[in-house]
Image (cartoon, helix red, strand yellow):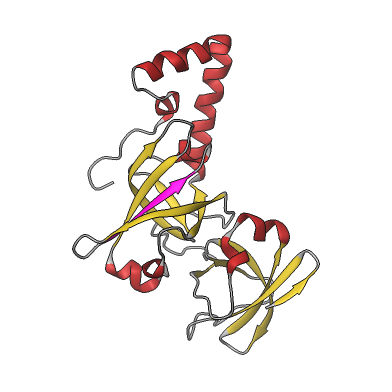
Amino acid sequence: MAERPGLRSFRLRFPTGFAQGLEIGASVAVDGVCLTVTALHGGDAADFDVMQQSLSLTTLAGLKTGSHINVERAAKKGAEVGGHVLSGHVDVMGTLAGVSRPQNNHVLRIALSAPWMRYVFAKGYIAVNGASLTVSEAQREPGGGGWFEVWLIPETLRMTTFGAKQPGDALNIEIERATQVMVDTVRDALDERLGPLLPALRVLLAERGVDVDALSAPLPLPPGG
């Protein structure tokens, strides 16, 4: 690890075979942050530069020699996409609020600040430290923040660093873009059509336990979706 004004350089060591065919200029997601290869060291290590803005917005600032991270190569044309498409552009850091361990499962409850919680819905996608996960439950709270939960099977724990995470740890969150666009479009339409009436509508709905953001919620996925 090396420090320069406004820039930090990392050297990452990969599992055997991960870097096969990797080239300078290629993209690698590191805990969900898209980084560019600046140098190669044999077949199992590479250097990356991280600018100050990325350090301030993500968990990369807390990495130390020996830290374990999730890594993923950029998708190739024609490759199967098993989750949802990720950009590697982290939106915000969430906080691990709790961990529970039902039989053969591992549940993470993640606290998320406003306004980002408005884009998180049960059965929707979200990226946590670069892993595409399905939201099992989501709860918005007064003020716009809230929490959501994701369930991890043993294979996910084996392939990622989630098993070592403890309450209070920061996590990189990337919002699913299609959901964000839809929610923002609906909110803009409400603002445009209702104008001055919107604050009163918010109060009226709040008295009945309804959040305006819930009006833009995607329809539930069918069973097996």
- Count of labels in the image: 0
Q: Position of residue 85 (x, y in %)?
A: 48, 54
Residue at the location (53% across, 28% down)?
Answer: 185
Q: Does residue 84 appear anywhere in the picture? A: no
Left or right relative to 74: residue 135: left
Q: Nearer the viewer, residue 135 or 140?
A: 140
Left or right relative to 134: residue 174: right
Taking the view exactly as shown, the residue that stands out farthest to the right is: 5
Task: Please name the predominant secondary structure of the magenta segment in the image.
Answer: strand
Taking the view exactly as shown, the residue that stands out farthest to the front is: 168
8 is higher (above) or lower (below) than 182: below
Q: Is residue 145 magenta?
A: no
Residue at the location (34% across, 69% down)?
Answer: 157
216 is higher (above) or lower (below) than 111: above
Taking the view exactly as shown, the residue that stands out farthest to the left is: 103
Q: Does residue 123 appear anywhere in the picture? A: yes
Residue range (magenta): 106-112
Taking the view exactly as shown, the residue that stands out farthest to the bottom is: 42
Q: Is residue 111 magenta?
A: yes
Residue at the location (59% across, 83% down)?
Answer: 45
Occupied quadrant, residue 62? bottom right
Occupied quadrant, residue 21? bottom right
Q: Position of residue 30 (x, y in %)?
A: 55, 67
Q: Position of residue 183 (x, y in %)?
A: 49, 32
Q: Position of residue 91 (x, y in %)?
A: 57, 49
169 is higher (above) or lower (below) than 91: below
132 is higher (above) or lower (below) than 111: below
Residue at the location (18% across, 63% down)?
Answer: 103
> On the rendered image, what quadrant is the N terminus found in?
bottom right
